[in-house]
Image: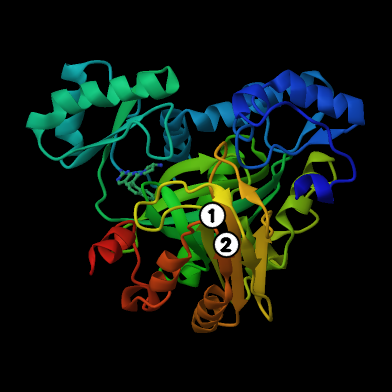
Amino acid sequence: MHVELADEAVCIGPPPALQSYLKLDRIISSAEVSGAEAIHPGYGFLAENPHFAEVCEQCGIAFIGPSAASIRLMGDKAAARRTAEAEGVPVLPGSRHPVRDLDDARRLAREIGFPLIIKASAGGGGKGMRVVGTPDDLESSLATAAAEAAAAFGDAAVYLERYLPDPRHVEFQILMDGEGNGVHLGERDCSIQRRHQKLVEESPSPALNDAKRQAMGQAALRVAKASGYRNAGTVEFLLDPQGGFYFMEMNTRIQVEHPVTEMVTGLDLVKAQIRIAAGEGLGISQTDVRIAGHSLECRINAEDPVRFLPAPGRVTALRFPGGPGVRVDSHAYAGYTVPPYYDSLLAKLIVHGSSRAEAIARMRRALDEVRIEGIKTTVPVHQRIVRDPDFLAGRTSTGFLLRLLQER
Ligand code: MV4
């Protein structure tokens, strides 16, 4: 589909990513032969690779995203935490530097208290994390977390944080021009996830009021400004049931769920990214940003909906819904074969309504109109979520989906 839609296409190699997308010289060559002035890295393979951003810079090609230095800084989760803390942005009690040894860990743990969580400095997205309930488990958990971090990231450094059980995940979209000017575009509530894979995202979050939104949005901008950020980014927070918020990490890319922000702000985020990369500035200030109505996104994955395992194969029949307030972002069509080489995301079904209730009603109707045959998808899970009483009441948290799946 992407080749059919493109004005011009260049083959970068065979399907496996290691032989194509991850071969930086092939990406650069394709820009050179086509005369491209800029590269948009998408939200996958190349989006948070500081080396790729550097190579683009050195080749005189604009990388549509932040500087290599910003990607590197925020990629170090312990350094990102220190940046937030230095700006007066709330963080959970934790260690300011990577754990030196077991004695260091024991001392830190006494200050932080239990339960605590061990996180990989080079981590993110849940890899290399261990929750520790009691002092007795600290030694073995430290060893496994460090080993996991070394294997996954080539860096064994870990740090400690007080563990917040069953939090909400609320993230703020920001845009920065690289000269210190920035806006936040409100938040996305991404609490409905399974094993760090998001299923449903929404904006605004049912958990925030205007005052909290303003406080968190300003906190997000302080973190971005302190790191000299440019282009689109997302600052992630954990929210506790009392309404306390804590900086978690910053994503230095456009994210899969950016359409819900586009729906409630009326902005085209990728257009904004390209404008910023071209040095044209933001074109808007915070007072121009208006959050209108409510938006939901269901990620439709080519997966077995019971075990959540990728289910590649041929789509034999396909129908997507339309109508007022319904948007589908997808590369799929009848006859399309889902390859086994990439992420299993098949379509994003996005709705907008004047209220949360209207958005949910539209999502129910739209999900019921989706027809995808030949492969398994996550549509049945979404059909359950949008009818769940806790979801309808806005009572979601990171433990929500597990609770839902354990029913019946
Ligand atoms: C936490 C946490 C509770 N307390 N940190 C998961 C991904 C990684 N970026 C950080 N994560 C968490 N960090 C403290 N101090 C709970 C999680 C977490 C989580 C966060 C967001 C969305 C889903 C999650 C699922 C499990 C754990």
The residue positioned 33% from the left and 61% from the top of the image is 401
Looking at numbered disc 1 in the image, what kind of residue is underneath it? Phe
Residue highlighted by disc 1: 172
Residue 378, horizontal then vertical, whole percent: 46, 60
At label 1, counting other C-alpha atoms closer than 10 Å, the crowd grade (few under 14, some 14-19, many 20 or more) is: many
The residue positioned 53% from the left and 75% from the top of the image is 363
Q: Which of marks 1 and 2 is nearer the N terminus?
A: 1
Q: Distance between the residues labelled 1 and 2?
A: 6 Å
| In the depicted structure, whether residue 32 falls above or below residue 377 | above
Respond yes or no on whether mark 1 lies under 8 Å from ligand 1: no
Quarter of the picture containing the C terminus is bottom left
At label 2, counting other C-alpha atoms closer than 10 Å, the crowd grade (few under 14, some 14-19, many 20 or more) is: many
The residue positioned 51% from the left and 30% from the top of the image is 75
Asked whether the viewer can see residue 208, the reply is: no
* Towards the viewer: 181 or 198: 198
Q: Is residue 33 left or right of residue 186?
A: right
Q: In this view, does 192 lie to the left or right of 1?
A: left
Asked whether the viewer can see residue 284, the reply is: yes
Image marks 1 and 2: residues in contact by CB distance under 8 Å: yes
* Towards the viewer: 40 or 17: 17
Q: In which quarter of the image is residue 93?
A: top left
Residue 315, horizontal then vertical, whole percent: 60, 56
Quick one: SS at disc 2?
strand
Looking at numbered disc 2 in the image, what kind of residue is underneath it? Gly
Residue 316, horizontal then vertical, whole percent: 62, 60
Residue highlighted by disc 2: 186
* Towards the viewer: 306 or 138: 306
